[in-house]
Amino acid sequence: MFKSNLSRLRSAWRRGKMALPVVLFCISGQAVTAQQTEVDYVNPYMGNISHLLVPTYPTVHLPNSLLRVYPERADYTSDQLKGLPLIVTSHRGSSAFNLSPISAGSRELAPVLQYSYDQEQIKPYTYSVYLDRDEIQVDYAVSHQAAIYALRFEKPGNPQLIFNTKKGDLTWDGKGLSGSQDIGNNTKVYLYAEFDKQPQSIDQVKDGKLTKSKAVSGDQANLVLSFAGDAKDLKVRYGISFIDAKQAKANLQREIKHYDIAKVKSEGKSIWNAALGKLKVEGTNETDKHIFYTSLYRTFERPVNISEGGRYFSAFDGKVHNDGGKPFFTDDWIWDSYRAHHPLNVLIDTEKEGNILQSFVRMSEQMDNFWLPTFPEINGDSRRMNSNHGVAAILDAYEKGVRNFDIEEAYRAAKGGITEKTLAPWSGKAAGKMDQFFKEKGYIPALYPGEKEIYPEVHHFEKRQPIAVTLGTSYDLWCLAQLAKHLGKMDDYDKFMKQSFNYRNVFNEQTKFFHPKDEAGKFIEPFDYVFSGGQGAREYYGENNAWIYRWDVQHNIPDLINLMGGDEQFVHYLDEMFIQPLGKSKFDFYQQLPDHTGNVGQFSMTNEPSLHIPYLYNYAGQPWMTQKRIKTLIKQWFRNDLMGVPGDEDGGGLSSFVVFSQLGFYPVTPGSPVYSIGSPFFEKSTISLSNGKTFTVIAKGASDTNKYIQSASLNGRELNKPQITHADILQGGTLEFVMGPKANRNWGTTK
């Protein structure tokens, strides 16, 4: 192969069709080094060991596809695998169905087997592992709604495959195996599997023994397929559905009509390169490329397209619907994703983002109350976290020209979610007395330590989170006002704009923090801005303390600067946050605030409410500090290794920040068609836009040292402000920076 390729290269060179330097570049030592494609830079293991809470998972899937898997184990360092996965139905979820291969008589039987393993390799589209004690080589490749396993059995004995469902049924129909599993809220996932060799017998494992059976149901239901002794190489292809087993079979037959696993891998790699290739980065720092494309890969894990052959099952009303040519997306944790994940979709795939937002509208229509979802998952809206930030994703897309969704119905759903549903975190109840207080007084009242809760809509553990909800809802109301203005609803616009200033009602002029008030309007005293609020600071804030929520006025940063005393004081308070000590030992700090990790002083790199904070220097006349902070924070906390993500990555919520920041700009205020400029990581980045144009970012001399912008131009014209608009990007063209090792404190100071 090598000699043949080399001969062709030499021949091409002799004919004058290839320059000799290219040939020499391609030959390294004994072999030709193929150029890396975008997906080759992805490292699914990045962040698989967590700093404290939830790690990343090495997910194998195609972009935004229904079928996702990852090795099922307690932690990356776990010594054993729990069977082989067939589908994960939610981000962070365990596998629905398991496949356990063995050689007959080689070990005791169980519905799901534990495996010692080695030589594991994972890429976004393929997985391989050696089950060393069982001597079974496993190879896997995935499509959108179907996948294939290739298994090689090295031990003596007849190969056997154990299929398991935790709570459901399995049936052998003479040609293939079908099954279902209950995943909650009247939602099921279905399986249909076929084999390149037919089994000799079908049994179930019961009390460690085989019992003849071709249909089983219940908890840990399983079927064991036994094959002839010479069937040392087995291939299993299967389809997945949320509609029924018949649809799972149709999905399989549509996507994988053969047992050629190499072909499925090749197709998967091409699909990933097409998705990742919408953003192309060039530069000499290979580590930065790994971090960039791995982060970008993470943003394609959610939400997932669950349309199957033009239909989809919706857990929001328990029915199967025709999708009308618009795919239905779910599994979208909006509290995390509205900040950068949705804006990234708008930037690189406007059609997909419009379909996601139309899915939000459909969910609203299908639920009992016409309220926008907050945490839509495969089995319905779990209503987690605080505020109703889906309205920000809607406004952001609409402001940036996305029109393939029903904006009138989206507005109605958003308005209902904010004004008719309770503002109490983690609740899907209707508005109650707490919400009436908010409408009358303009803030959520707080309780004193030990004071008994009186509002039934408040979650027993998540509490009121009064500052987080007051600030978050002020932003949501601003978004609602902007939508109302677009739609000509000026009464709504005036009302919601006035309410968008509610954050002022909890601002403490003396301390310059947002400070909880009781129902009488008095600030809760005494008060500690680091530790007051109990577990996760939920009695007053939410997962983060007052130092993070001090900056949670995304929609009116100039007013926040004024409240804090002007530019100079604003910058002083920003700096103060980054140097403020934890105040207790790490053990005590993180025991109370486990989500508040990735600390630089009181700043938390690991939690989404922090993501816009480093960019705030831009608004106070010191963009060089934004450049310094962004480069430093990403270099400190995001690395191409097993601990390379500082905290809960949230399936793209945190990674989107990295993607934007490495490109050189960030959407500080989703809903405003403006990006704040940071410090570009690559000498050249090219964005392929949905309108067919390209936008290029050039950063001359960019490096770890040369982090500071010396000068900038947009399409040849001098740029001396630290922002660009979405319209600038849509026109195509070039944003060019000259970078240097020391700050140019005069650049970008124009407000």
Image: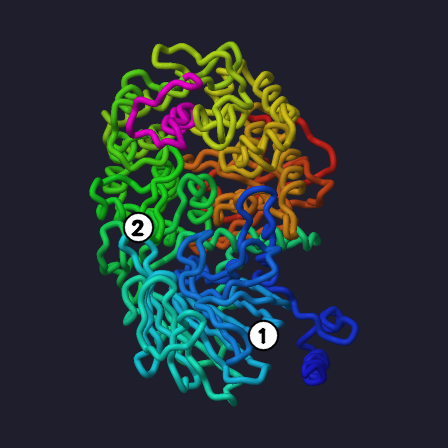
Secondary structure predominantly adopted by residues drawn in magenta: loop
Q: Nearer the viewer, residue 492 or 164?
A: 164
- Secondary structure found at label 2: helix
The magenta stretch spans which residues? 448-474
Q: Where does residue 23 sit, x and y in percent of width and height?
A: 73, 73
Q: Quadrant of residue 712?
A: top right
Q: Quadrant of residue 254?
A: bottom left
Q: Amino acid at mark 1?
A: Asp
Q: Amino acid at mark 2?
A: Ser
Q: Where does residue 443 sit, x and y in percent of width and height?
A: 36, 20
* Tag count: 2
Sooner in the amino-acid sequence: mark 1 or mark 2: 1
Q: Nearer the viewer, residue 589 or 273?
A: 589
Q: Where does residue 244 sit, x and y in percent of width and height?
A: 28, 66
Image-based side of 450 in relation to 510, left or right: left
Q: Residues within 10 Å of mark 2 (few under 14, many from 20)?
A: many
Q: Is residue 394 above or below residue 192?
A: above
Q: Is residue 354 above or below residue 141?
A: above
Q: Is residue 674 above or below residue 116?
A: above
Q: Magenta includes 455? A: yes
Question: Disc 1 marks which residue?
Answer: 134
Residue at 39% x, 56% y: name it.
304
Asked if marks 1 and 2 touch (Cβ < 8 Å), the reply is no
Residue at 50% x, 81% y: name it.
159
CA separation, marks 1 and 2?
A: 45 Å
Image-based side of 568 in relation to 164, left or right: right
